[in-house]
Amino acid sequence: MDYKLLFDTAVFAGELLMKNGAETYRVEDTMYRILKKSNLKTVQVLVMMTGFVATLDDPSMDSLTVVRRINSRGTDLELIDKVNVISREFCSDQIPLEVAFTRMKTLWREPHESKRNLAAMAALTGGFAVMFGGSAADVAVAAATGFLTAAVLFYCRKIHLHMFLENMLCSVFLAIVVGLAVTFLPGEYSRDLIIISAIMPLVPGAAITNAVFDTLHGDYLSGLARAAEAFVIAAAVALGIGIGMSLI
């Protein structure tokens, strides 16, 4: 077996899972199962919220160790599922190592479809407005606000803005857009309902869920870190909405 190729496959899997919102337990378990296929004496994986360390060692070879820091994180459950499928197929000997590596590397290089994300954000915010009992006008404004906010969010991530500033600026922009729409567009609108609908995609629900999950699995350091991340995001959104509403 090509141990270097196996090691790279596990590293690709770990990076993809961590960057797209997977729980610490899932990342550690997936990497460990892939590396365990080597049947070597020492397989160690330590995953934290900001990175991971993996080691593959045996008396018959020089040890392989990697330290990888993860600087940006998002949420893409579809991509997490694809990584899980590949790892399970490899670990159950349904596909060879070379195929698993190629598929992991393809996912790692695959660009995000920004246009689809914009449309999805509009549909999501409009759907929340419907769920909260908004009128047709409220739904339209919420969907348009979601679309524009997604564009601002995409730009902030493109220039690698800090997470706190990213969420705060998006929230300020969101509140200003809603305030202008309610003030100048004809018809009656529920400003509070539209703002609540529009900020729902920014709410750190995945971070809170993963914080609880990691804590229950004994990963206390990652659990506390994710809880802190959720608090920072929530504070940024609240501050941004407050600033935006005070300007209109």
Image (cartoon, helix red, strand yellow):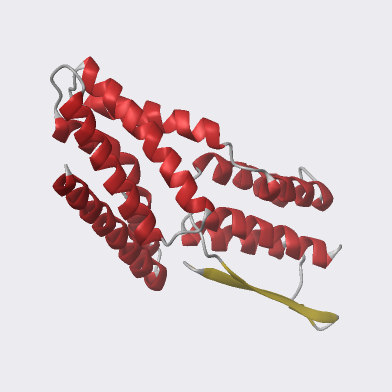
Among the 4 quarters of the image, the one containing residue 231: bottom left
Q: How many marks?
A: 0
Q: Position of residue 168 (x, y in %)?
A: 31, 54
Which residue occupies the foreground of this view, 71 or 36? 71
The answer to whether residue 230 shows anywhere in this view is: yes
Q: Position of residue 26 (x, y in %)?
A: 52, 56
Relative to 25, say whether 140 is above or below: above
Among the 4 quarters of the image, the one containing residue 184: top left
Judge from the rendering whether residue 182 lies leftward or rightward of residue 231; answer left or right.
Answer: left
Residue drawn at the location 53% of the way across and 58% of the way down? 18
Judge from the rendering whether residue 67 lies leftward or rightward of residue 125; answer left or right.
Answer: right
Which residue occupies the foreground of this view, 91 or 188? 188
Among the 4 quarters of the image, the one containing residue 127: top left
Judge from the rendering whether residue 8 lies leftward or rightward of residue 242; answer left or right.
Answer: right
Relative to 192, say whether 47 is above or below: below
Q: Position of residue 19 (x, y in %)?
A: 54, 55
Q: Position of residue 213 (x, y in %)?
A: 37, 57
Which residue occupies the foreground of this view, 145 or 125? 145
Residue drawn at the location 67% of the way across and 62% of the way down? 11
Residue drawn at the location 68% of the way across and 60% of the way down? 10
Which residue occupies the foreground of this view, 51 or 87? 51
Quadrant showing the N terminus = bottom right
The answer to whether residue 21 shows anywhere in this view is: no
Relative to 60, say whether 122 is above or below: above
Residue drawn at the location 28% of the way across and 57% of the way down? 236
Relative to 121, say whether 175 is above or below: below
Quadrant showing the C terminus = top left
Judge from the rendering whether residue 152 lies leftward or rightward of residue 169; answer left or right.
Answer: right
